[in-house]
Amino acid sequence: MPITGNARQLTFRANNLGKEIDLMLMFTPPAEGKLYSDLYPVCWKVLQFHSSGVSAATVHYSASTAFVAPQKDTDNIVSAYNVESCETGELCALMTNDKGNNYLTKAAVGSKGVVQCKVQTSTPAEVAFGLFNADKTTVNPVFKWTGLGIGSTLAVRLTPILKIYAVSDYQASEIIKGDVHSEVKFEVDLMTLPHETNWNVIRDPVSKEIKIVRA
């Protein structure tokens, strides 16, 4: 199926790296919130590459967005209690049911240029923002907000700047609670790329540094 619109597909390949490598993918957080205080990036994906032979991984950025009402008490992982599709120009409401659980309403018309969530819960709330996979069967969280005030409206203007780190201590949907103590290996606004691109993951034979270069 061809990649169209704002969707992007990136394929990463490696050959005889000499060491098993994990790549952690995340997006640069938006300006709405105080980073690592009430706004947290979430690990989008983790790609694994074997030490020998050929390894390959393909990631699909669907550009289809959603809000996520997280499960309670899930430690550092964002698990969904309820998910609702919400695209740019649309608004969802976050409300509280009779059991005290927060849930999202179906999207309605919102403000141009932003994705909005109006907080109408019984107590200050948390909500995550994510991306659907290619066939829109699951949502992968990419940001999480906490302590959102009752009556407030969160407005997200998404610029999909993808960052990749060569680190091995993260898993998909894990909340990133502080700066990643590693050099970023890849940083690009996906909207500046063609619909499909190929990248080589290499390990410098002298410095042993991991690099990601356009194929």
Image (spheres, grey):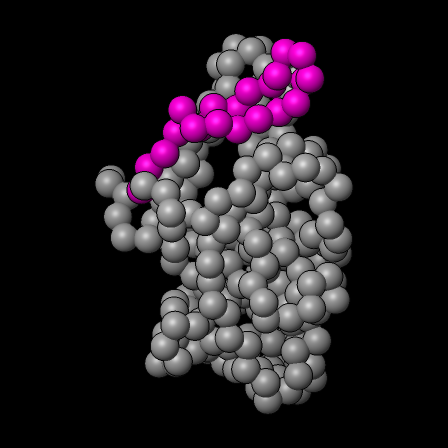
Height in image: 16 above or below 196?
A: above
Is residue 51 something one can see in this rendering?
no
Question: Quarter of the image holding residue 154?
Answer: bottom right
Give the camera-side residue of 131 and 102: 131
Give percent across and percent down for residue 89: 37, 74
- Asked whether, in this view, residue 105 is left or right of residue 52, the answer is left
Residue stretch in magenta: 195-215
Residue 156 is inside the magenta segment = no
Name the residue rendered at 47%, 68% in the picture: 157
Q: Quadrant of the N terminus?
A: top left
Name the residue rendered at 51%, 14% in the picture: 15
Height in image: 84 above or below 14?
A: below
- Asked whether, in this view, residue 96 is left or right of residue 105, the answer is right
Is residue 31 something one can see in this rendering?
yes
Name the residue rendered at 44%, 38% in the picture: 59
Q: Quadrant of the C terminus?
A: top left
Residue 203 is inside the magenta segment = yes
Question: Quarter of the image holding residue 24?
Answer: top right
Give percent across and percent down for residue 87: 39, 67
